[in-house]
Image (spheres, rainbow, N blue to C red):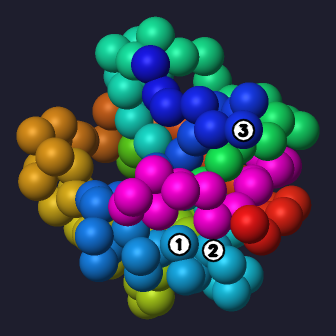
Amino acid sequence: MWPRVDGMRALELGFPGDMRDELNTLVLTGAKTATTCLLDEYTEESEGLEYVGERQALLDTEGRRVATLEFIGVEVKPFGDVTWEHAKAEGEGDVSLEAWCDVHRRFWDRAGTPVDDDTVVVCLAFRVAEVA
């Protein structure tokens, strides 16, 4: 089960430490308005999908809420069907969809869950509703 903070489910981006700090900064500056998760993680954590209008607490490495996010889009699709528009909205500086795919494959490989084009992912679009 995912952590709960201030009565909301919580979202932790990337790995704790520098990666999470960098991703949270991108969110807080408005550069990052999307993220991608593995559908299998929801099953493993006994969690339901996000829904449009849901608010979640964005956490830092220490588990503190840095912002409240409101979801404005939720799509479930194979990794190979992720669009450049979604990848670009992740705001991490990827110059092409291929580069985004490579970065995400390496991330999930490091996490011990390699992906291929058929792996089902959840593409989330959000806005910052409140900065903590």
Q: Nearer the viewer, residue 58 or 39?
A: 58
Q: Nearer the viewer, mark 3 or mark 2?
A: 3
Q: Earlier in the sequence, mark 3 or mark 1?
A: 3
Which residue is drawn at the image coordinates 66% and 48% (left, top)? 57
Q: Could you tell me the amino acid type at mark 1?
A: Asn
Residue 126 drawn at (x, y percent): 75, 56
Check the image and report above or below for 18 versus 126.
below
Q: Which secondary structure is most common in the magenta stretch?
A: strand
The residue labelled by disc 1 is: 24
Q: Quadrant of the N terminus?
A: top left
Q: Could you tell me the amino acid type at mark 2?
A: Val
Check the image and report above or below for 87 versus 68.
below
The answer to whether the residue labelled 3 contacts the one labelled 2, judged by CB atoms less than 8 Å apart, is no
Q: Which residues are magenta?
A: 59-72
Q: How many angstroms separate mark 3 from mark 2 (CA)?
A: 19 Å
Q: Nearer the viewer, residue 74 or 29?
A: 29
Q: Could you tell me the amino acid type at mark 3?
A: Asp
Q: Is residue 68 magenta?
A: yes
Q: State the image quarter where residue 48 is shown.
A: top right
Any part of residue 100 in sight: no
Any part of residue 105 in sight: yes
- Secondary structure type for disc 3: loop
Q: How many angstroms separate mark 3 from mark 1 (CA)?
A: 18 Å
Q: Nearer the viewer, residue 100 or 6?
A: 6
Disc on res. 6: 3
Which residue is drawn at the image coordinates 61% and 56% (left, top)? 65
The residue labelled by disc 2 is: 27
Check the image and report above or below for 39 versus 94.
above
Q: Is residue 86 left or right of residue 112?
A: right
Residue 127 drawn at (x, y percent): 80, 62
- Secondary structure type for disc 2: helix
Check the image and report above or below for 119 versus 57.
above
